[in-house]
């Protein structure tokens, strides 16, 4: 990794599908400068590397290995999100709004 592992508190990507479009993005939470001044450059590094990767993705420059790993991660996240009633209900609601029905697991894969 190009920056210290403890530098970002959280890095989370998100996506939201809509009927005719979608939204993809990420958010990063860093330690405040006052409590971790040595991490200030790491925050800038995280931002730069993230912007470079988003630019690369926007040019559709994705390697097969990256795509395969993303598919595995997506399947894992889908299954993880079904853990617990709240997550299950939220997932069912999104499916009904988007597809008009609940999508079975075997159809998702």
Image: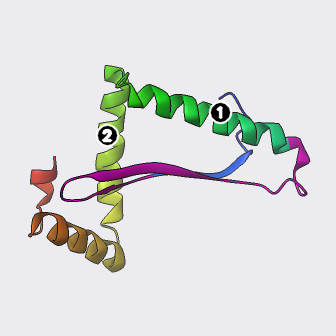
For residue 74, side relative to residue 106 (left or right)? right
Task: Label 2, secondary structure: give it.
Answer: helix
Q: Residue 40, position in %: x, y?
A: 83, 43
Q: Nearer the viewer, residue 106 or 54?
A: 54
- Picture layout, residue 44 above or below residue 31: above
Q: Verify CB contact (< 8 Å) between mark 2 and mark 1.
A: no
Is residue 44 visible in this depiction of the protein?
yes
Instruction: Tell me which residue sits at (57%, 36%) in the image.
Output: 50
> Is 30 part of what is drawn in magenta?
yes
Relative to 73, does residue 32 appear above or below in the rendering?
below
The quarter of the picture where residue 1 lies is top right
Magenta residues span 14-38
* 70 vs 105: above or below: above
Q: Position of residue 3 (x, y in %)?
A: 72, 33
Which numbered mark, 2 or 1, is in the foreground of this view? 1
Say whether residue 12 is visible.
Answer: no
| Secondary structure type for disc 1 | helix
Q: Residues within 10 Å of mark 1 (few under 14, many from 20)?
A: few
Q: How far across and how far down the image is residue 75, in percent?
A: 28, 48
Q: Is residue 19 magenta?
A: yes
Residue 46, by quadrant, is top right
Q: CA distance from mark 2 to mark 1?
A: 26 Å
Q: Which residue is mark 2?
A: 72
Q: Which residue is mark 1?
A: 48
């Amino acid at each position: 990794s190009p920056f210290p592992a403890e530098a970002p508190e959280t890095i989370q990507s998100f996506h939201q599908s809509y009927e005719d479009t979608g939204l993809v993005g990420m958010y990063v939470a860093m330690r405040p400068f006052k409590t971790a001044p040595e991490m200030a450059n790491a925050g800038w590094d995280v931002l730069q590397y993230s912007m470079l990767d988003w630019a690369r993705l926007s040019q559709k420059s994705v390697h097969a290995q990256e795509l395969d790993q993303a598919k595995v991660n997506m399947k894992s996240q889908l299954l993880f999100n079904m853990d617990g009633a709240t997550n299950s209900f939220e997932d069912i609601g999104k499916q009904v709004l988007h597809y008009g029905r609940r999508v079975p697991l075997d159809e998702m894969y």
